[in-house]
């Protein structure tokens, strides 16, 4: 049986592999959560987006986040120019991703429940969405798309 830290590390590695397999770059941040400097658990990005992600694996149907942890994630993301996300893995469920604004405020902490995850959370695939393309695919789409400009002085 794995301890909590080992489960968290395994979950982080799973997400790192997923992002890299999708053509993104992704790394685990050494010492995240134990450093005096703000740092997310993983950083993922491509030519268009940068994500700072705090990852949690839980055996419960509810996960709490201390105010300080969320504040540090927000601070890091703002200074780094990244989107701040929280990823939670509930038992027998996919990973769910939440924007910080979607976390439930409980007074002294933040909370995510499995029920919330099903309504507000994004799966890995939804998080990447149409951004799951590299620069070559983006250029191809742009070259195949006609752009129309409205000229108010044109009287056709």
Image: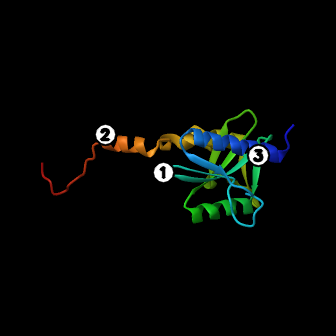
Q: Which mark is residue 25?
A: none
Mark number, residue 8: 3
Instruction: Find disc 1 in the rendering and name its residue.
Output: 47
Looking at the image, which residue is at 87% across and 37% down?
Answer: 1
Image-based side of 18 in relation to 151, left or right: right
State whether residue 72 appears in this view. yes
x then y, percent, for residue 25:
57, 47
- Callout 1: SS: loop
Q: Nearer the viewer, residue 28 or 88?
A: 28
The residue under label 2 is 144
In front of the other: 22 or 72: 22
Please name which of the two marks, 1 or 2, marks the residue nearer to the observer.
Answer: 1
- Other-residue count near label 2 (Cα within 10 Å), few / some / many at <14 / 14–19 / ≥20: few
Residue 18 point in image, percent of width and height: 62, 39
* Among the two numbered marks 3 and 1 on one chain, the one whose residue lies closer to the N terminus: 3
Element type where label 3 sits in the image: helix
Residue contact at pointers 3 and 2, CB within 8 angstroms: no
Q: CA distance from mark 1 to mark 2?
A: 20 Å
Above or below, comparing residue 69 to residue 86 in the picture: below
Q: Secondary structure at mark 2?
A: helix
Which badge, 3 or 2, is on the more N-terminal residue? 3
Quadrant in the picture for residue 32? bottom right
Residue 67 place in picture, x, y as percent: 73, 61
Mark 3 vs mark 1: in front = 1
């Amino acid at each position: 049986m794995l301890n909590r830290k080992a489960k968290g590390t395994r979950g982080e590695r799973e997400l790192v592999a997923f992002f890299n397999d999708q053509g993104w770059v992704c790394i685990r941040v050494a010492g995240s959560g134990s450093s005096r400097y703000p740092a997310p658990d993983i950083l993922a990005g491509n030519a268009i987006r940068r994500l700072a992600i705090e990852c949690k694996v839980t055996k419960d149907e509810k996960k709490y986040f201390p105010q300080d942890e969320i504040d540090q994630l927000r601070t890091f993301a703002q200074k780094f120019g990244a989107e701040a996300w929280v990823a939670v893995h509930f038992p027998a469920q996919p990973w769910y991703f939440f924007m910080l604004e979607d976390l439930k405020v409980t007074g002294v902490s933040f909370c995510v429940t499995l029920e919330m995850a099903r309504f507000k959370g994004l799966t890995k695939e939804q998080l990447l969405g149409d951004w799951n393309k590299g620069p070559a695919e983006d250029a191809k789409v742009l070259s195949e798309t006609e752009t129309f400009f409205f000229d108010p002085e044109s009287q056709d």
